[in-house]
Image (spheres, rainbow, N blue to C red):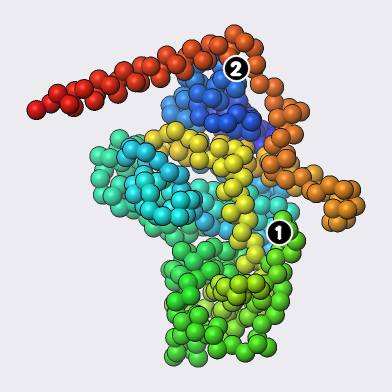
Amino acid sequence: MAEVLASFAGRFGRVEPRRTATAFVTGLLSDIEVKTCWQLAEQAGHARPDAMQRLLYRAVWDADAVRDDLRQVIVGRFGDPDGVLVVDETGDLKKGVHSVGVQRQYTGTAGRIENAQVGVFLGYASGHGHTLIDRRVYLPVSWTEDRDRCQAAGVPDEVEFATKTELAADMITAAVDAGVPVAWAAADEAYGNSSVFRAHLREHQLGYVLAVSRSHLVPLDGGKVRLRADRIAAELPASAWQRRSAGAGSKGPRYYDWAWLDQVTTDADPDDGGRHSLLIRKNTTSGELAFYRCWTPAPATLAQMVRVAGIRWTVEEAFQAAKGQVGLDQHQVRRWASWHRFTTLALAALAVLAICAADAAIGDADDDPGHTGLIKLTVNEVRRLINACIIRPISGLAHRLHWSGWRRRHQNRARRSHYARRLNLELQP
């Protein structure tokens, strides 16, 4: 934890915000139920939430610079030439219309259209560990076409509309330019279906295994024929399938049947010099199919493709840990800068858990849990141990009663304001 916090301590010109940032990340790692500025301030022993709120709103520090420092720490621990960049998005359900980027839109968090705020994230995964290293808030057209609304939320004037795939491409470019050791990229079909996104990865000479929809048209025979991915799968003989593991899961190796066709071409740049292919995954129990457009700048093996396809799920694990353990979705901020600041500090807390879990696994040459009778430390268990051994919450009765009174006083003030507003609306002709 000290290593992560020290990596970006120099980004704060004054000691007060630096100490508050340390307390903020420590609070995100604590076992308090809700991780808003009020609760984090109480956890840290502050008398008021002002310092925590100032850190997110008015303090002078660059969240992107902190993100860069954090990325260097993660790469220093997990970096591998065969590393994989994994792109995905996640949504936070919101009330109201003022939080930056919020509108009624589809989010996988709810599995339907809801009033939500969506962020696009970049993960890094290798054989040494995985975590999230970058983030972008998605601004729908309804926001970017309303500059007054953007100004009220603190969105910089130069920020224009960008699709989620464009945000993902920007993060990948930033990672490559920063020297992150990486050979592959993986993403779900929302990104894999984009020929522009695939071309962007090829420009960086990144091999990719990108999920595509079953209706995705795959060019064959030099692009002369285009067939739906599911039709290609239906015509494959039984001999085309090989059973392989996509990696270890909580219940053992995740075995699927795989078919790999390397006769496809690209629909954008047929002379790119790489090797295009279609990877198909079949669930051994249900027979459900998944499809992947693949490209490599050099010859590759089926084992490599299957590994990258399996690694894509690390981003889902990272989202689950980020929301369940460090409160990634519990922020109560409205403005552009505040969202990026809160999210960056949450990624720092998540990095602490990921690095601790990876460090605990070093030296364990025997992967058989029966060797010690224990499974490897998970990020959930690491956080429990951090709270048991390191974090010392302020538990004095006077402090707790002070905060109880503070909360009730401000909640009462808010209720009076809401009542007055409602009465004014009712009395208007």
Residue that badge 1 annotates: 249
Q: Spatial distance from mark 2 to mark 1, Cα to Cα?
A: 40 Å
Pick the quarter of the image with the N terminus.
top right
| Left or right: 3 as drawn, with respect to 322 | right
The answer to whether residue 126 is above or below residue 292 is: above
Question: Residue 329's x, y, as percent?
Answer: 50, 40
Task: Count all numbered tags in the image, as a single digit.
Answer: 2
Q: In which quarter of the image is residue 151?
A: top left
Q: Are marks 2 and 1 in contact (CB under 8 Å)?
A: no
The answer to whether any part of residue 62 appears in the image is no
Instruction: Please state which of the two labelled residues, at mark 2 or mark 1, is closer to the viewer.
Output: 1
Q: What amino acid is labelled 1 in the image?
A: Gly
The answer to whether residue 298 is above or below residue 367 is: below
Question: Residue 400's x, y, as percent?
Answer: 58, 14
Residue that badge 2 annotates: 45
The answer to whether residue 168 is above or below residue 60 is: below
SS class, disc 1: strand
What residue is rendered at 43% in x and 26% in y? 58
**Nearer to me, 50 or 253:** 253
Answer with mark 2 or mark 1, whichever residue precedes in sequence. 2
Residue that protrudes farthest toward the left in the picture = 429
The answer to whether any part of residue 210 appears in the image is yes
Q: Residue 338 carries which label?
A: none
Question: Residue 237's x, y, as percent?
Answer: 62, 89
Residue that protrudes farthest toward the front in the picture = 286
What residue is rendered at 48% in x and 35% in y? 331
**Nearer to me, 206 or 142:** 142
